[in-house]
Image (cartoon, grey):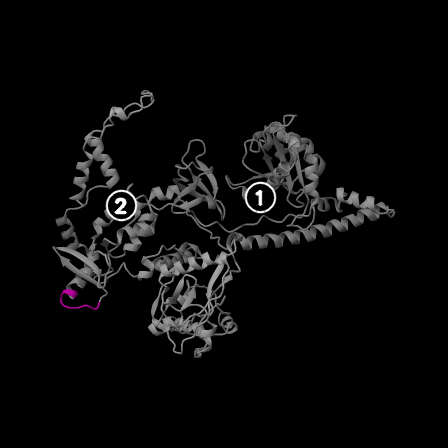
Amino acid sequence: MDQVLPKARASRSKPLPTIPPSTVDSTSEEEEFPPCAEPTPEELEADTAELLGEGGPAREELSVAQQTCPTLEGLRQQAVKQANGDVSDSHRVYWEDNLLYTEHRDPKPGAARRLVIPQEYRKFLLTLAHDIPLAGHLGQMKTWDRLVPLFHWPRMSEDTKEFCKSCETCQASGKTGGTPKAPLIPLPVVGVPFERVGVDIVGPLDPPTASGNRFILVVVDHATRYPEAIPLRTTTAPAVAKALLGIFSRVGFPKEVVSDRGSNFMSAYLKAMWKECGVTYKFTTPYHPQTNGLVERFNKTLKGMIMGLPEKLRRRWDILLPCLLFAYREEPQKGVGFSPFELLFGHPVRGPLTLVKEGWEQPLKAPKQDIVDYVLGLRSRMAEYMKKASKNLQASQELQKQWHDQKAVLVQYQPGQKVWVLEPVAPRALQDKWSGPHTIVEKKSEVTYLVDLGTARSPLRVLHVNRLKPYYDRADLTLLMATDEGQEEDTDPLPDLFSSTEQDALVEGVVLADCLTAEQKDHCLNLLGQFSELFSTVPGTTSWCEHTGDSLPVKSKIYRQPDHVRDCIKQEVQKMLELGVVEHSDSPWASPVVLVPKPNSKDGKKEMRFCVDYRGLNLVTKTDAHPIPRADELIDTLASAKYLSTFDLTAGYWQIKLSEDAKSKTAFSTIGGHYQFTVMPFGLKNAPATFQRLVNTVLQGLELSVQHIWTI
C-alpha cells in the first residue's frame, strides 16, 4: 500500500487540465460561473487522503506484525505443521517472502491467495473497504465481499459486521435500519358515553370557504365513536375553547380529554378551562399520533368525505359538514358493532333510505307507549348496547394486537444509554434520517423514554420507543479479541453456494417471548449473534446424508404451460441454476413441471410455486420406512415445557446432497431445456423420511428437542 499511494498522490499533484477558449460558449455570463482557484498541493494531498485513505504499513512492518500478533498464533502453528507434510486441512497456510498467506487447496479459477492480516492493521483495511468515498459505505455483505478475496484473519466476518454496524454515517442515514416496532398497547375500553374524548384540529384546508373557515375542530367520544366537528377560521386558544364549550353544552363535560401537543391545546388558557371544569387532560407522545388513533382515523375519513363532494360544493364544506357527520354517525362501527347514533340515543335514526322505504310502504301507526315504559326500555336497551359494544371492542383490540405483535419486539433502553432519534419530518434526499447520538434520561413507561436532545428550545422530550434505535460507538469497538493459542478460527466456513449469492441477515427478525427477562433476551441475542451465519435465506448443504435410488428410467411428457407462466418458469430455473441446486442434464429420466399458486401471496399479487410432478418416479421408488413422529405425540412431549423455541430451516430438503446416480433421476424438462437437481427436491416419495433421518442425527442426544416436518 505504501508503494501505491505515493503514485496516486503524484498523479493528483499535476495541474488540472484547462479548457481551450474555443470550446467555451461565448454566450455564457462570466459572472455566473467564476473561475475556480487551482488547488494547492496541500489541498490535493488532503483530498487524496480523504478519497483513498491514509497510507498503510511498510512491508517489513507487516511481516514483523504477522510474526508477533497473538491472534495469528494458530495460523503460524498451522503453517509449521503443513510445512512438515500435514495436508489434512482444507486450506493451505504458508510463508512466502517473509509474509504469511492462506488459500484453498482447490482454488477456483482466478482465485488469488489471501494475505493474513495482524490485529493492528485490520481497522485500516476495514476503513478502506467501507468508510472512504471509493468504498461507498456499502453494507456488511458487500464490505465482506470486497475484503475476502484478498485478505484473511480470524473472526473476519464478525469484525466486518461490528465495524459496519458501528459506522456513524450509516447509522445516521438509516442504512443499518431501525428497530422493530414495539408491541401494541391498547387503550382501556370506556363504557360510559363522553367520559373520555379525543380532540384534534384538521387543516388548514385551502382555499378557505366563503365564510373564511380553514380549520375543523374534531371531537370523538371513545365509548360511542360519536363525532362532533366545528368549522373554525383560526385555531387560537380562545376560538378552540369557545367551540369546545359549545360541544360540551350538548353532551356534558368529559372526565378525560386526549389531544396532541399543539400550542393551542397546551396553552394556559385551555389548561385553566380544564381545571375549572374538572377535566383531566392528557397529551400524546410527540410524533406518535397512534396514541390518539381514534381521532386521527376519523380525520382521514372526514377529509375523504369532503374530497368526495362535487367540486362546486367543495368550497362550501362548512355548510355541508352536518350532512357528512350524519353519514358517519349512521353507519355501524366495525370495532363496536353499532352505529354512534344507536349507542348515544338508544335507537337507529331515520335517514334518507328509511324515508324512501317509508314512502313506498303503507304508513304504520306507532303504538302508544307510556313515558315511564319508554324510559325504562331505553335504559335497558342502552345497557345492552354498551355491554355488547364493550365486548366487541375488546375482541377487536385483541385481534388488532395479535396481528400487530406478530413481528413486534419490545426494545429496552437504560438511563445513560446513547440512542439515535428518528427525525419528525421526511428528510430531503441528502439529509440524514436519524439525529444523534442522544442520551436516555429516564424510562417513563414500557414504550416511552425521556431523552436529552441537547437543544436549547426543547432539551428534554418524551419519545416513543419506535422513534429510537441503539447507538453503536466505534470507539468502544475492540477489533479482534485474541484467540486461544493454537486455535484456528477460519473465516471461510461457507460453501461455494453462499459465496455466490447475496444473503439477508435474519437474526434481527427472531421473535423472543415477552415473558423473558431483559437479561435472558440479551443472552439469547448474544447466542444468536455468535451463530448469525446459520440464519440465511439461502440453503446450505450437508455431506452427512445423501438421497439415493435405482430403477429403470421413467420419462413423462411436458405439460403444456400458458404463455403468462413461461417467464415465471424461466426465472425460477435461472434462480436455481445460480444457487447451484439444479444443473443442465442429459438424463433419460424426465418429469414434468407444474406451477401451483401460493396460498399466502404478498401485497395481493398472485405468486406461483415451482413444482416438479414426480408421481411417475415415485411409482418405481422403494419406500423408506424411517418413522416420522406424530404431531399429537410431539405436542404431548412439549406439554410440560416452560419455554418453546422454534427453528425453521431455509429450504431444508435442498440441504441434502443427491448421489451422482440419483441426480439423473430427478431430471425435469421445460420449454427452455432439460435439468436435474443436485440436492434433494421437494415432491420425492422418500424425501420426508430422508430429511427426518438427517434431523434425528443432528439432534441426537438432545432430550428436550423434537422434530416435526411441516408439509405445505
Instruction: Residue 201: give x, y in percent of width and height.
Output: 59, 34
Image height of 24 relative to 144, above or below: above
Which x, y percent locates residue 516? 46, 58
Whether residue 97 can be seen here? yes
Q: Residue at x 68, y 48 (%)?
A: 332
> Disc 1 marks which residue?
293
Q: For this rendering, which residue is in front, 161 or 638?
A: 161
Which circle marks residue 245 in the picture? Answer: none
Residue 609 drawn above or below residue 688: above
**Residue 361: image location, x then y, percent:** 84, 47
- Amino acid of disc 1: Gly
- Image position, residue 404 (x, y; %): 53, 52
- Disc with the residue nearer the chain's start (2 vs 1): 2
Question: Could you say which is closer to the camera, residue 145 or residue 578?
Answer: 578
Q: Secondary structure at mark 1?
A: helix
Chain part drawn in magenta: 82-88
